[in-house]
Image (cartoon, coloured by chain):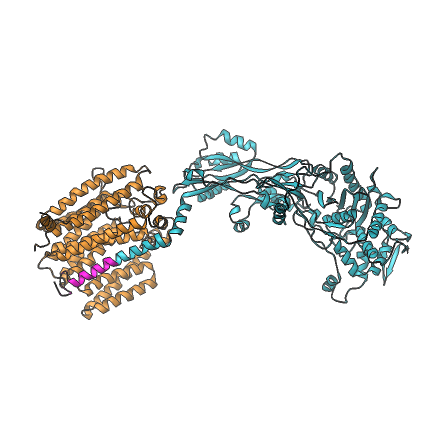
Amino acid sequence: MTGDGQFGSARRRRVLMIVVFLIFGILMLRLYELQLLYHGEMNKKSEENSVRAIVQDPIRGYMFDRNGQLVVDVGPSYAITLVPVDFDMKNLDLLSALLQIDPATLKDRIARARAYSPFLPSRIKRDVDTRTLAAIEEHLTNLRGISYQIESKRVYRTKAHASHLLGYRREISDAQLAQAGEDYRQGDLVGVAGLEARYEPLLRGEKGFEFVSVNSKGQIIGTFEDGKKNVSAREGYDLFLSADFGLQAYAESLMTDHSGAIVALDPSDGGILVLVSKPDYDPSIMSGVTPPDLWSELQSDTTKPLFNRATLTRYPPGSTFKMVLAAAALEEGVIDENYRIRCTGSFRFGNRVFKDLHVHGSVNIIEAIQRSCNVFFYQLMLKVGFEKWTEYGRRFGFGQLTGTDTGDETAGLLPSDAYYDARYGKGKWTQGYLISLAIGQGELGVSPLQMARFAAALANGGIVYQPHAVEFIHNKSTDRMERVHYDSSLVGLSPRVMAMLREGMRRVVQEPGGTGGLARIPGIVSAGKTGTAENPHGEAHAWYIGFAPFDNPRIAVAVMLENSGYGGSKAAPLARLIMQRYLFGGLPSNHPGPAPTQAAAVKTISQAVH
Amino acid sequence: MLEYLKEYFDFKGLLICLALVGIGLLSVYSATYDVGAAASFEKQVIWTGVGVLALLAAAYFPLRALQRIAIPLYIVTIVILLVVLVIGKTISGSKSWFGVAGLGGQPSEFAKVATALALAAFLARTTTSLSNGKHLLTAIGIVLAPMILVIAEPDLGTAVVFFAMMLPVLYWAGASNFVLAAILAPIIAATGALLGTLTFLFTLLVGGALLYFTRENRFAAAVAFALTLAVGLTVQSAYERLQPYQQKRISTFLSPDLDPKGAGYNVLQSKVAIGSGGFLGKGYLQGTQTQLNFIPEQWTDFIFCVPGEEFGFLGASVIVILFTSLLLHGIKIASLSSNKFGSAAAIGIVSIFAVHVLINIGMSMGLTPVIGIPLPFLSYGGSALVANMVSVGLLMNFYAHRKEH
């Protein structure tokens, strides 16, 4: 047994032993790698494997109005669930009839449920009505694998729609889901418009988790660590709104036959009292899972009920904008109250003639506001100049976002030198372009929300507030009521100028010859300004901005009616009714009871929101 | 007295075997006790009893007689394999289970040992010479016959064991490097052919190189290469003629990652189980992977996960060390043995154990393809346990008779 070719040679024995040691080495190395090197990773995987978190949806935050009335509530919604392994496909037709889903669609949903998990219940129809639920319950014994689970949906406890203020939720999209991380899962509803969208992170609360042990089939075999690691759901924060839902409902009723918007603000803080955009929709149809056909019907409706006219339209403001020019002229000292011109009913500039509605004769600025004399402001514009006009427009917040918390908005359009240079080229536009702007026509766009803020600034002596719907937030983590802080800026007008502007506006309503006489409220002095925005596509848009009471304004309002004609005749009466109702409706104007708490907590919340 | 015992009784082999069997029983109990398969554990205990008796019988069976009946035993085994192929009931997708008194037996487990014995008996003949082409082909044929039968079942895993057992035995018996290369090259080429044209060309190159460097004469080398090429091409064209599902089965066999919900899933869960065991393990009966049944077939092919998860690195190392000691001990017996039959048979048994251990533990840790072969002494299954204990008994027998010619 010596040579290599011999039976059982020593050399070959060594080779075989080396092979054995190699096997030993490979296995030990791999054991070391898996059990010592990657132990943490593998251990985590092992835990993920055997422990499932059952998500418990939190109760979404409620919304209360300024009178402490619960307006947006949460109620039960029923989802029909199916466990694929338990369901007998022979019952497909029965189930299809009960749920009113065609068999092909239902089959597809069951297939998807099976792909998710054959052993766990999947929702196959959500937010079913009670009749369907009753029908299903009747057949439960025949329909093995079918059950239902209770989810939550919005319940609206108000006569008002307030659709554009409150907004709505939709099922989270795949794209959102990919971004959202662990806060959401498939099928969750997420706010996409209005307050529901803006306050989504606060309203939604935090999901709870119940940890259970499962076997390899996903069947639950018991609680995990006696529930010690369970996390209970945290309710969403409640919102306390500045809005008055009685007034909101009333304003909506006034707008039934109109297309347009009404925004009313509390001039003392910019709180939104009313935000109406018409046509609108009943938010309760979108309270849970909106059926796709209903959704596409809303979207394709030519009257655009989903479009928020209060914050997204940018029509010219018409004569209401004369107040900006008047402010600039007086504050800059270009004219004073003694400055008068003679209105002949038209104004010639170059070879163009700009018209007025009437021959006003000799007018000073207060009378020009009262009677809305165009000729006065045509000339004034040329005296004040474009730059100053733009500056004062900007001071009143035009051409910028208001920073409202109610959802999407437009900045509108406030033209300037730079704007015209960019649009037409330097030196290619003339002063003639400015003349239309003097009376709020032409290339100028404002939203009703901006106009309401404008009215509020004129009412409160020159404070431009960030208009907002939410005043307080009930923080469920600390159980404290926290005030939300908002920005404001000063227009910077001297009291004397402010008084003149307000006097002009008072006369618009209160004095004979004023264009806004229809806004007069018996027993109260109110002030305002009418506007009629010329519309090349049809009937003019009617505007009215105003506030009352004159000496101690408690409400500022902007009314915009699309294609309705003169502001003085169409918009002013609506404004009057709203202010009258608010001031005399027996409605308390004080905020709800809860007092603001510590500043530190307040700061966190405002940062979270803004 | 003790000296006498030590001279004739292989304590070491027996102790290693019993230690492994003990760990195996613990593992099977852990894997089955709460999944309604507790009856499996009881069966396994009974089989252990049978195994001990079989071990003693094998250890004390007269060696000469064993050598004489090796070939007839082998022929009987072949017949049984044929019968299984025709009437055997299908379990786990292949026809290898043989209904015996309601207990179920797997003849191929015994066929491996029987074939090793037969091959050893043939090589032990004084007239046999591996440089004689006819003798060499006979030796190869002894292994190929049962191998083809188990492939037909189809039990590819066991077929791999047959092949892997043949090479070391021939090597031990003095086959030239060229002979070994000539056997290995066609197999490498055939495997390559299944994996695609590029790998086929590469494996052809490797096979060619092996033959070139071990060549004894050019003619033989050329013939061997031609054979390699022919086998490769045949396999390739046969593969292309297979049904897609059959192709898939083969590709999954070669790379389980292609089937993440099937074989790939098992490997992943098994790796997680072993890895999550850490250094000390999660404690006996505390393994979540094991106890929650994340690993299918965890009491058969994936049994290693159970001690891996519950006893950790410490426990798993003990198992690997025990197996390694058994293999080294077997090689030692083979080289101590004066009679060629015992020596070659010992190498055959060691090789069978080695392949099982490497592939089974390897696949549990994602190192080797998922080939359904059990882990000796640990995996649940009566025939395998008895066959393995018989093998250890045989090693003890060879040890006791190591000085006889």
Colour in which chain B is drawn:
orange
Q: Residue at x 44, y 44 (%)?
A: A115
Question: Residue placed farthest to the bottom in the image?
Answer: B218
Q: Position of residue B381 (x, y in %)?
A: 25, 43
Vertically, is B405 above or below A585? below
Instruction: State the residue in front, A491 or A524.
Output: A491
Q: Is residue B352 visible?
A: no
Magenta residue check for A20: yes
Q: Residue at x 88, y 46 (%)?
A: A513
Magenta residue check for A516: no
The C terminus of chain B lies in which quarter of the figure?
bottom left
Q: Residue at x 75, y 34 (%)?
A: A586
Q: Position of residue B58 (x, y in %)?
A: 14, 46
Count of marks, rendered view: 0
Q: Position of residue B44 (x, y in %)?
A: 24, 40
Q: Residue at x 15, y 65 (%)?
A: A4
Q: Position of residue B347 (x, y in %)?
A: 17, 55
Vertically, is A58 above or below B152? above
- Describe residue A529's horizontal placement relative to residue B153 as left or right: right
- Describe residue A306's horizontal placement relative to residue B31 as left or right: right
Chain letter matching colour cyan: A
Q: Is residue A582 visible?
A: yes
**Which span is picked out in magenta?**
A1-21
Instruction: State the residue in front, B364 or A335.
Output: A335
- Describe residue A501's horizontal placement relative to residue B282 as left or right: right
